[in-house]
Image (cartoon, rainbow, N blue to C red):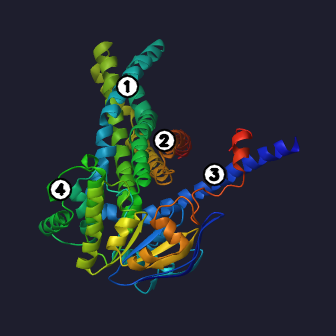
Amino acid sequence: MVRLRDVQFSYGPRQVLRGVDLDIPRGKVVAIMGGSGSGKTTLLRMIGGQLRPRSGEVRVCDSLVPELGRRDLYALRRRMGMLFQFGALFTDASVYDNVAFPMREHTDLPESIIHDLVMMKLHAVGLRGAARLKVPELSGGMARRVALARTVALDPQLIMYDEPFTGLDPISLGVIGQLIRRLNDALGASSIVVTHDIQESLQIVDYIYFLSEGRVVAQGTPDEIRASTDPWVHQFVWAEADGPVPFQYPVSKPYAESLLGDAHV
Amino acid sequence: MFELVGAGFRAIGSRVVNGIWRIGFCARFFGTLLILSGTSFRRPRLTIREIYFSGALSLIIILVSGLFVGMVLGLQGYDTLQRFGAADALGPFVALSLLRELGPVVAGLLFASRAGSAITAEIGLMKATEQLSAMEMMAVNPIARVVAPRFWGGVISMPLLAALFSAMGILGGYIVGVIAIGGDSGTFWSQMQASVDFHHDVINGVIKSFVFGVAVSLISVFEGFDAQPTAAGVSRATTRTVVISSLAVLALDFVLTSLMLRG
C-alpha cells in the first residue's frame, strides 16, 4: 500500500529524514514511533503529498506521490484519510457538518443519504447524540472522535493518524485505540499511527517502526518489540531517561557557558 | 564601521528582495485564485454567504459613516459656497464629492478595516489551526473552497457598499442643507440632477469602487493565506491588511482619477 525507499528531507539546513525505508502492507495497522522532532509527522505529510522529499521514493497505491500533478494527487487523497493531532475541525461548523463535509464535497448524494451516513459514522465513534453541537462545545477527546469520524467519512483505503492519543484521558485513549483497530478491520484499510504511546500501540498495531534522528533504528511486531534487547527499543518501551535516544536538542555550547555567559541564547 | 554599513545594506537588500518575492508570490496567488474561481460561481451559496459576512455585516458602519460624512459636507459646503453666493450649488457639491471621490474611497477604507481585517484573521486562524491543511488532505483545494468565495464576496460587496455610502451621504447633505439650514429642496435636487453626469460621475465612481474591491479583497485573502500560523503571525497579517489596503486605496484613487480626468 505504502512504500518508502531511501527518503531524505530537510527543513532548510536541518536534515529531518536521512534515508528512511518503510513498508505499510494492505490491511495492517502500523505504528511509527520516535522522540519529538524525529521526523514522524514529516513522514506522514510526505505520504499525503503535502511535502516533497529531497530524494528517495514515496509510493502510495503504486503511485509515486511527489511526481503526481494536482489533479492526480487529489484523486489519490480521496482514497486517504488523515486525523490531525488536534483534530483540525472546522470551528464554525457543527459536528454534523464537519463529518458531512467530505461527502458534500466529493459526492452527489442526496442530503437524506448524507444524513444517514453521518449518523452511522458518529454512532461508530459514540457521538451520535452530539451531532448538533458546535466544535467549541466539545472536549478534547470528543473533538478527536469527531475528527476520526470525518477522517473515515469516505471509507478511505489508507488512514493516517498523527498523535491520536495525545492529551486524552485513559478511557478516551482506550476507546480511540480500539476504534482505530476496528475501523481499519471494518474498512479493510491500511493505517499508519504516529504516536508516542507505546503501551496503547502495542495492543492495537501489527507492526512498529522506531524513528530516531531521521532514520529507522528498530522495527518489528509487538511481540518482537516486547522481547527486544535493542537499546533504542528498550529505552522507549521502558521510558528510561538514559539511553541512545537523546533528550536534549543538539547544542554546541557547554551548559556552564549557557548559564554563566552573556544573556544571548 | 564597514561591518555596520555592510550590515545595513544587507538588511535593506534583504527587505527589497523579500518585498519583490512577495509581490511575485501575490501575483501567482491571484492567478491561481482566478483559475480556481469556478467553484464560487458553480456553488453560489458559498459566495452569497461571504457577501453577507463582508457586505451585509458592514452595512451599519457604512450607512452611519456615509450619513455623517454627508452632513459634514453639507455644513462645510454651505459655509463655503454661501460666501461666493453659490449656496444653490450645495446639491451638486455634495453629490459630486461623494460619487466621484468620497463614496468609493471612504467606503474602501472602511471596508478594509471592517471586512478585510476579518477575512485575513479568519483565513489566518484556519491556517494556524490546520483547517486548511485538513481540507487539502480531504482533496478539497482551500483556494477554491475558502479563498475564492471570500475574494468574490468582497469584490461584489464593495461597489454596493460604496453606492449605499454615497446615497446616505447625499441624504445627510440634504438633512443639513435643506432641513436644518433651510435651503430650497427643489433647487437642491434639480441642481444635482442637472450637474451629475451618469457616465462621467456615477459609472466612474462604480469603476473606482470595483477596483478598490478587487485590491482590498486580494490583499485580505493573500495576507490571511500567507500569515505565519501563530497568534502573533495572524495579528501581524491583520494589521498589514489594514495598512496596505488603505495605502492601496489611496494610491489607486490617484491613478484612477488621473486616468478618468484625462479621458
Indicate which disc residue A131 carries.
Answer: 4
* Whether label 1 touches label 3, CB < 8 Å: no
Q: Position of residue A175 (x, y in %)?
A: 25, 63
Q: Which one is in front, B257 or B72? A: B72
According to the image, label 3 marks what residue?
Answer: B19
Co-location on one chain, circles 2 and 4: no
Per the model, the C-alpha gap separating discs 3 and 2 is 19 Å
Q: Secondary structure at mark 1?
A: helix
Amino acid type at circle 1 is: Gly
Indicate which disc, 1 or 3, sits on the residue closer to the N terminus.
Answer: 3
Of residues B158 and B20, the one nearer the viewer is B20
Q: Earlier in the sequence, mark 1 or mark 2?
A: 1
**Label of residue B103 in the image:** none
- Report crowding for label 1: few under 14, some 14 to 19, many 20 or more residues within 10 A (C-alpha): many
At a point 50% along the width and 39% down the height, the residue shown is: B239
From the image, state whether disc 3 or disc 2 is nearer to you: 2
The percent coordinates of residue B159 (x first, y second) are: 37, 44
* Contact? badges 4 and 1 (CB < 8 Å): no
Q: Is residue A12 above or below residue A28?
A: above
Left or right, residue A74 beside residue B51: right
Who is closer to the viewer here, B88 or A251? A251
Q: Secondary structure at mark 2?
A: helix
User: Chain ID for label 3?
Assistant: B
Determine which of the numbered discs, if any, sits on residue B235 in the image: 2
The chain letter for the residue carrying disc 1 is: B
Residue B151 placed where, x, y %? 40, 53
Determine crowd level at label 4: few under 14, some 14-19, many 20+ residues with C-alpha closer than 10 A: some
